Amino acid sequence: MQVIKTIADFRELRRQLSRSVGLVPTMGYLHEGHLVLVKRARTENSTVVVSIFVNPTQFAPSEDFSTYPRDMGRDLKLLEREKTDIVFAPSCEEMYPSEYSSWVDVERVTERLEGAHRQGHFRGVATVVAKLFNIVQPTRAYFGQKDAQQAVVIKRMVTDLNMNLEIVAVPTVRESDGLAMSSRNIYLNPEERQAAAVLFKALSLAKQLWQDREKDADTIRHQMTSLIRKEPLAQIDYVSIADTETLEELKLIDHPALASLAIKIGKTRLIDNILLE
C-alpha cells in the first residue's frame, strides 16, 4: 500500500494506472461503514484509492473541525488489512494553497435539509470532491447512503459537469441497535449513546407506517417527531419526508421517498435516513 501526500506525486503515479480505479473519499477516523465502501470498491476495480482529508471548507466556524477525530496510524492499518492500493492523504495547504479562490456551487438540492442548517457546507463538499475527482480520475467513486443528501449533491454535480465516472451509493452500516456508524459517534457518552438509538427508532416507525399504507407525509412526520420528543436528550433540527431526487418535502407519498432527520444528542449532531421504496 502506497501513501501519497502531494498532488504532483499522485498524478505521477496515476499515469501508471491503466485499468479501473475506485475512489473512496473519507475524512479518516475510519469505521466499518468506511471499510464496507473499500470492500465494495475492491470487488469492482483493479485499483482502490482511499483519500483521507478532513476538509476545512465544509465546516462552519462553530462546528468541530479542530476537534474532529483523527488517527492516521490506525486508519492506515485498517486500510492495509482491506488490501487498499493507494492512500491519498494531502495537507490542507496542498488542497487549498494561499491563493485558492475557486468553488463549486450545486444549487437547489443543497438548499434543503443539511444545506438549510449548515451554511456553506455543500459548497465545501462539492468543491473538495470535484478536486479529488480531478486528481484521482476514478472510474467509480463510493459514498455511504447515510449521507443521502451528499450523494444526491455529488450525483447532480457529476451529471451537470459531465464528469466521466460512476457514483456508487452503498447502504448504511449500522450498530446492533440500529445507530448509523459515524466517526462522530465517539463524542457520545454512555447515556447519550443509549439515547441516540432514537434516530433509528423514528426512521423504523416511518418505514412501518409507510408499509402499512400510510401515504400522508405530515402524519408520518408528526409521529416521528412525537417519538423523538419522548427522549429527553434529543433535540430536533429537522424531520423530513422528501422526494429522493429533488429533496423537496412531500405531502403525499406516491413515489419513492427519503425519510431523514438531524438530531442533537447532547452536543453531538447526528444525521440518518431510510428509503421508502
Image (tube, rainbow, N blue to C red):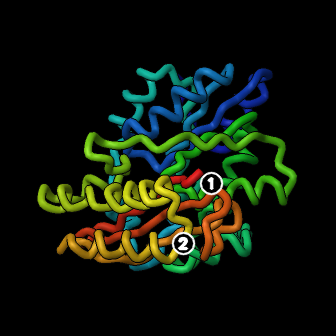
Badge 1 local density, few (<14 within 10 Å), some, or many (20+)? Answer: some
**Of callouts 1 and 2, the N-terminal one:** 1
How many marks do you count on the picture? Answer: 2
Please state which amino acid type lies under the numbered disc 1. Answer: Ala
Question: Residue 183 at x, y = what percent?
Answer: 36, 51
Question: Residue 22 at x, y = what percent?
Answer: 66, 32
Please state which amino acid type lies under the numbered disc 2. Answer: Asp
Label 2: which residue?
216
Q: Residue at x 67, y 48 (%)?
A: 132
Vertical placement of residue 210 versus 223, above or below: above
Question: Residue 265 at x, y = what percent?
Answer: 26, 68
Vertical placement of residue 74 versus 268, above or below: above
- Determine whether the residue tagged by mark 1 lies in a helix, strand or loop: helix
Pair 1/2: label in front: 2
Label 1: which residue?
151
**Residue furthest left as drawn:** 191
CA distance separating discs 1 and 2:
26 Å
- Determine whether the residue tagged by mark 2 lies in a helix, strand or loop: loop
Vertical placement of residue 242 versus 209, above or below: below
Q: Is residue 155 left or right of residue 271?
A: right
